Structure formats: C-alpha cells, structure tokens
Image: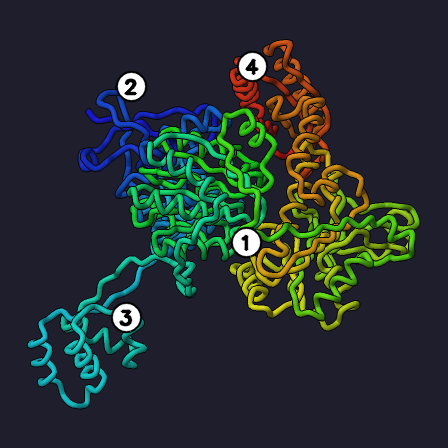
Amino acid sequence: MAVAKVIVDVPAKQTNRPFDYGIPERLIHVLMPGMRVIVPFGPRKVQGFVIDIVTESQFPKLREIIELMDIEPVLNEELLLLSDWLTEKTLCYKISAFQVMLPPALKAKYEKKVRLINRSQLSMLSPVLQTLFSNGDVIKWEEVSNGNELSLLQREISNGTFEVLYEVKERVKKKTLKIIAPAVTKQKLEQIRSELPSRSVKQLKLIDFFIEHSEPIERQKIMSTIGVSSAVIKGLLEKGILIERTREVYRDPYKDRDIEKTHPLQLTNDQSQAIQPILAALEEKKHDVFLLYGVTGSGKTEVYLQAIQRVLEDGREGIVLVPEISLTPQMVNRFKGRFGDMVAVLHSGLSVGEKYDEWRKIQRKEVKVVVGARSAIFAPFENLGIIIIDEEHETSYKQEDNPRYHARDVAIERAKRHNCPVVLGSATPSLETFARAKKGVYQLLTLSKRMNERDLPKVEIVDMREELREGNRSMFSRVLHEKLQDRLAKKEQTVLFLNKRGHSSFVMCRDCGLVLQCPNCDISLTYHRFNQQMKCHYCGFESIVPTVCPECASDHIRYFGTGTQKVEEEIAKIFPEARVIRMDVDTTSRKGAHEKLLTEFQEGHADILLGTQMIAKGLDFPNITLVGVLSADTMLHLPDLRSSEKTFQLLTQVSGRAGRHELAGEVVIQTYTPEHYSIELAGEQDYDQFYQREMMIRKIHKYPPFYYITLITVSHEELMKVVDVTEKITSFIRSRLTNEAIVLGPVASPIPRLNNKYRYQCLIKYKREPKLTEALKTVLDHHQQDVLHSGLQIAIDKNPYILM
C-alpha cells in the first residue's frame, strides 16, 4: 500500500505534523514529494504538501488524496530539507515555511459552496431556498447573505438535503494565447480556394495568408494583420479548414524594454585582488562566506557580474539579492545586459502573475540567475554555484512576520548544502558581519578606492541650531541654498534626501499642546497634504484634519515636521525654475512608477530628485554633483539598538550618490545634533572609526554582536491579561536559563498599543543557552488554546531588527 505523508494548509499546533493519506491507484506512479495535493480534512478539502511517500501507515483506515495540483514538484528535495531548518530556527509552523518559499500565486484560495443533493426535492423546500437554487444545484456561500436564509439552509444541511463543498482554487491562471494554424495541406488549401465563391472576400483573404505562411500564428495578430473578424475565423474553424490551439506564454515585465548588451570590463587591481579568493572557492567547489567591503562607487557590481560569469561557465546557477528599494531598473539592466534571458527577476513591484511566471522559469531551468528581493533566496535552483547579497546591511533582508528569517542566514544555510560561496557586499557592513570578518569567520575582501580613482565627495555638516539663531527659518541652510543655486545655473543634478515620509509628522494644537493621536494605537497621526487627511501608518486609520481642537476648541491647529510634499512646495517658492521629481510612498505606489521617475531623472528631465529612503542607494547617475540631506537625525532618537548604525549607514550611502563619474561631488548634511559620532563620522566617511565607537557602546550595553537577543512580544485587547501572561512567560524563561543570560521585562513595548491591542515585551540577551529554544517552544505550546480562542498573540523573534 502506498501512503503519502502530507502537511496540511492549516497553521495550528495540532496540525503541525504530517498526516497519512492513501494514494489512489491512478496517482501511484505520478505522485512525488514536494507536490501540492488536495486532501479531505475534517468536513472540508484543503491544500497540502507531500513531504514523503512510504509503504505503510500505523493507522488502519486512511482517507485518500482527492487530486494533484502539480505536474512536477514545486519544492525540490533541498527546499524540503531547508524547511526543517527554517521551522527550527524561527519557531514557525511547517506550512508557513513552505508558503514563504513559494510565489503568492501558489497559495490556495478556498471557496465555500452549497450543493443541492437531489433536485426533485426542490419543490418541497421553502420559497426562499427555491428562488436561491432556481438556476442550478450549486451556489456560492456568499450568495446566502442574510440570517433568515442562513438558518433555513443550515437546518436543511443537517437534514441531508444540501451539502457544503470546499473548493481549492489556484490564485492565478497560466496565461494562454489562442493560436490559429491550417488543418490541411497547402495543396488542399489551394483547392478550397478555387471552390470558394468570389464574394467570400474575407475567407479568401484568410486562406491566401495561410497558403503563403503555413506556420501557426496568434489569433489576435492575424485579425489585426489582415483585418478579419473572429466570425470569419470561426467559419473556417467549423469547416475544419483551420484549427485553433491554446499556447501557454509568460507574462514578461521587461518585454517593452530595450536592454543594451554589455561586456565584462577590465578589472582594477583592487577588484582583481578581491575576486581572486571568490574564484578560487568556485574552482574548489568549497563553501565560504566573503565580505566584500568597498566604498560607494568602488565597482562591487562588476565583481559580482564576473563571479557569476564563472559560475555560469561551470554550468551552475546564481542568486543575487538586492534590497527591495534599490531594485532599481539600473540593477536589473546590469544583470539583464550581461546575461540576457538567463535572468529572472523577483520583487514586490511585479503582479502576482508576473512573479509566478518568473518563478516558473527558474523551476523549469530556463534561467540560470535570479535577481530579487528577500524572498528570491528560496529560488528553486538545484545546482547553486554562488549567492550574492548586495548592501548586506539593509534591514529589508529581515522578514518581520512569520517565519521571521534573515535572508543572510538562509543564504549561508543553502550555500553549505551546495558547497558554494556566499558574497556579502556593502560600503557600510552591519556590525555583526564586520565583527565576523574581523574574527576570521568570514573572509574580508576590501575595495578601498572608487573605480576611476575619483575622490569620495566632500561632505559639509551644517548645524541647523546655528541657522535658527541667525534668523534662517527656512528648511534649507544658507550653504545648501547657495550650492543648489550654483547647480541649477550649471545644469547639474541634485539629490535631496529626506529621512521620513508623509507631509508633516503630526498635527498639534498651539494653545493646549494636544497632539492628535490614533484612537487604536498609541502613536500620533501623520498628516498627508494631498488629500488633507491624517493617517496612522500602523493600523491604517484615517481621519480629516479638524478645524478646531477637540480638547480646548481653539482654532490654532498647526502641522509640525517636514515631509517631501512640503519640501517640494518650498523649492517651488525659492527656485521656481527648478524641475523636481518627488519620490516617496505616495508617488511610487502605482506599478512601474518608481522606474518611470528614475528614467525621467536619468534622461535629464529634472534638476532635483527629492525623496525618502528609496533613493538612498543603488542609483548611479553621471550628472549628480550635489547631495543634500535635509534631516539627518530623525532616526537617531528612536528606541532602537541600531539607530546610530542605521543613521551612519544611510548618510554614507546617500553621500555615495554624488560625484561617481567625471564631475566632482559635494554633500551637505543638515542636522540638529552635529556632535553625534554617527553624523560626524558619516561626514568623514570613516567606517572603521565608526565601527570601533559603536562596538564599544554595544559591549557596554550587552547587545549584538557581543550577545544574541530574542524578543517576545505579547498582545491582547485586555491590558491586565497582557501584563499577566508576559509576567508568567518572563519568570518561566528565567527559570530555564543559566545565570549568564539577561532577561529584561516584562515592560510595555515602545508603541504600547497597536490596532486596539496592548503590547508588552520581554527581551533576552544571551551568549550560549542550549535550553532556550526548548523553553520558547514550551511557551508557545502552553498558550496555544489561549491564542486560538481569546485572540492572544505571542510573537517570538530570535534576531529582532526592530525593537518597537
């Protein structure tokens, strides 16, 4: 007897194990581990993943698999093994691990329907039900809208008149085209042509076309080429003269783009030295982790491209991860320009269907390289030769919801299994990575000079407190104002960077000091100018700006803070002749907008590119000679252990956009805390000095890389329950760990209420705690019922990047 071990699509502790199902005769030689199947589970049908096929089961009576969803496995053997590691590492359910590995199109969509079992009984039912089922035996559950219909129907379901069906549907259909071809030989076509009456002009035209071109052609294409209607085609199809087939095609997000073919460049001495150890590891098929530490503009991308070239010559495959926001067309163009159609691209700007098609190209081995954001690390390659993570310090490589994995950890785990190198690249590596490179855990490769021996841009730090004292109330310091004027006169381009989003941080009453808060979260609302609304960026609450203060009825309501829209208006006042492109969440939310705006800027249709985080990295335009940072310190004051590190990295990255080519670059950083070491050292672009200072502080406070940290966050609508549960969890964890571990809490989270749920947390700092994972699993198991029934939430992050 053949038995399939299936993980079902029900994320709960009780279902977090394989279930045994019988394999029907027709599927015995077809079914393979890694395929998706539809199985009966309780009263419904659900999607499941086959993880193994065995010959016997300890259960006497097994239900059978209903049907297959795939022709070939969607998860290969290595990814099935990787899911074990992922569930252990991030404490997630097996089904969550599988789902994060697949494109969203492969997640099942469940449809609930009601079927009338015996139509002859319809006349005996109530008029309401007779009307509902007058047109057919099956209706969607949503059509049974009001309570009256529902209770009638439920009574009849228990009487056995109706049954409830659960249908599993695919999210996305494969894209197909209709293809027309002649069904007969050329001679036969000529004979038919001679027998047709001369008034059948369109049919004659169509037959003439196929006498000349015998190969199949798209239906739409032939209709537009020779101007015939679908009725004409239908006529010849019915006579059996033509045949119609459907052909599956890929949705190609890059089909309208002309990408110039590029060739490998001559490497500089620095680059040659850096690439040597990588090539040696490729040669020996040996797993190693390299940190490619190179200043901005030092030519890291060319090193990646040439290393991949070697991997492809070897017949192996490569994954390149880039941060979501710097998945600029530039990066895609560089890889597609060098490797053409061998490249698949995966990122959040693609539609569900486009992602699915790119993923299938990888699965079918039609491409050899994937360039993508975080989730591309799970690309289903079977012969990996290299994994490259560009800008490895970026926080977008960490997933903030379940499974809470870091792409770098997954990359290293996969590379071990494939015996291949991992290359981490950055001008400002994360402290953990740099510390590992210093200790020799990773190999350090350095690029200390820019490609064309250009100097790094000159950085000037402006103290905005001084500006204010001297009567300059504008958001532009005098220095930046002068330099902007100069660039506009010289027709050179400027990038202005604003360290936040929205039009203005908050709305406040000047008389009583009330700041308008979100009713569901303990956080102030953000003012968005273009629709005069206030929004909560956490739960999505929206409201109109009040004309009078709700507290003291004063009409002195003012907006505080600076947003990109406000800056844009200010520029229009001071430099009316300047052409500005604004890039922020509002202007880039439409598909393809990001790319369109950058292309416009590259082609010189604007003088100033104004934006938030998304313009900080990856841009390489020859004409940018000035970078202005309008507010360097917005991140410094967040309750986050990495706030200084993030500020330093961001400022260094932004500065690196200037003077990358022939023209020299300048940078102006405006700040209210110029004495802070992360701002001072970003001005000097001195990473090594920053690393020393920050490591000292981390050591004193017992933070990574000296200690590991795990964050447990508990949330619920009742405050007392949250406090009580967090206290119990904290004392239980304390009792299970050694005295070396530091357990902090319970304490309210920095944002104490989100979406009407109170939040408390407990932070664990430790070096070696063999019993920690077991203790955390016990916590999750113990509170399982509470989580299911009372809406309690417990989130455990074993390597948190955000402590808010």
Q: Which residue is mark 4?
A: 769
The answer to whether 777 appears left or right of 49 in the picture is right
In what element is the residue under mark 1?
loop
Task: Indicate the amino acid at tag 3.
Answer: Arg
Q: CA distance from mark 3 to mark 2?
A: 54 Å
Of labels 3 and 2, earlier in sequence is 2
In what element is the residue under mark 2?
loop
Of labels 3 and 4, earlier in sequence is 3
Q: Which residue is mark 1?
A: 452
Q: Is residue 91 visible?
A: no
Q: CA distance from mark 4 to mark 1?
A: 49 Å
Decide which of 564, 65 is in the foreground and name it.
Answer: 564
Q: Quadrant of the C terminus?
A: top right
Q: Which residue is mark 3?
A: 219
Of labels 2 and 4, earlier in sequence is 2
Q: CA distance from mark 3 to mark 4?
A: 65 Å
Q: Quadrant of residue 107?
A: top left
Label 1 CA crowd tier, 10 Å (few <14, some 14–19, many 20+): few
Q: Which residue is mark 2?
A: 59
In what element is the residue under mark 3?
helix
Instruction: Please tell me which residue is depicted at 48% across the width and 40% down the height of the picture.
Output: 389
Instruction: Nearest to the eye among marks 3 and 1: give it.
Output: 1
Instruction: Please tell me which residue is depicted at 47% across the width and 40% down the height of the picture.
Output: 274
Residue 405 picture location, percent across and down: 51, 33
Using the image, determine if residue 200 lies above or below residue 689.
below
